[in-house]
Amino acid sequence: MTDHLTIVTHPLVQHKLTLMRKKDTSTASFRQLLREISLLLAYEVTRELPMSMQRIETPLTGMDAPLIEGKKLALVSILRAGNGLLDGVLELIPAARVGFVGLYRDEETLQPVQYYYKVPTGLDQRLVIAVDPMLATGNSSAAAIELLKKSGAKDIRFLCLLAAPEGVARMKEAHPDVPIFTAALDERLNEKGYIVPGLGDAGDRMYGTK
């Protein structure tokens, strides 16, 4: 773990990730595992949220009790695979505001092309958690973070399931102020820009499109 990269080594996270990596895991199981693992990852990415005290009444007495401070969090899904992580995080933080960044990767250049962008207001006053299962080349993620910064976001965290060293390096170069939280740092990218050993295309496996 560094300041820039946090690898969540919790046994439940690692166990579920192994099941997701198996090529014979069904679409339904893959989707369910992604939802479960995203809950556990969300627990880590929100660990350092600012708190404030509020006077409340319990059934027995009054007390000063901690509550999360400030505006509601913003969760931003990098489409389409980001929605798999988003669903689980929303179970943990149901009051969060939600945004979407639509990017696809040009298979020739491996560069991101934007096709959709809709985010909550007041990003400058919210913790923004961007979610995308795979941090591969890092080009799409870096482009999405750049768009969020242009919308005013100042406190951004990036949550992914798997990361490649190339993607982590690209993000650190482009956005050194954005910490990355992931379940595993894999070996490398192959010539097609896929993470190895990885788990294949997260979107295809989640939605059964291959």
Image: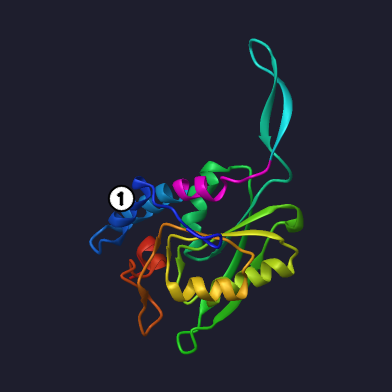
In the image, the segment drawn in magenta is 39-50
Q: Position of residue 201 (x, y in %)?
A: 37, 70
The residue sitting at the bottom extreme is 108
Looking at the rendering, in which quadrant would you find the C terminus? bottom left
The residue sitting at the top extreme is 60
Residue at left 50%, top 51%? Answer: 87
The residue sitting at the front extreme is 2
Mark 1: which amino acid? Answer: His
Indicate whether 179 appears above or below 165: above
Q: Which residue is at the front of the view, 155 or 83?
A: 155
Left or right, residue 90 beside residue 60: left
Q: Position of residue 177 (x, y in %)?
A: 64, 65
Q: Which residue is at the front of the view, 106 or 126?
A: 126
Quick check: is 41 in the magenta stretch?
A: yes
The residue sitting at the left extreme is 24
Q: Which residue is at the front of the view, 106 or 128?
A: 128
Mark 1 surroundings: few (<14), some (14-19) or many (≥20) residues within 10 A: few
Q: Which residue is mark 1?
A: 15
Q: Position of residue 101 (x, y in %)?
A: 60, 67
Q: Which residue is at the front of the view, 205 or 5?
A: 5
Disc 1, SS: helix
Which corner quadrant of the image does residue 149 belong to?
bottom right
Q: Is residue 197 visible?
A: yes
Q: Is residue 121 visible?
A: no
Residue at left 70%, top 57%? Answer: 120
Residue at left 75%, top 64%? Answer: 152
Quick check: is 198 in the magenta stretch?
A: no
Q: Position of residue 89 (x, y in %)?
A: 52, 48
Residue at left 36%, top 85%? Answer: 191
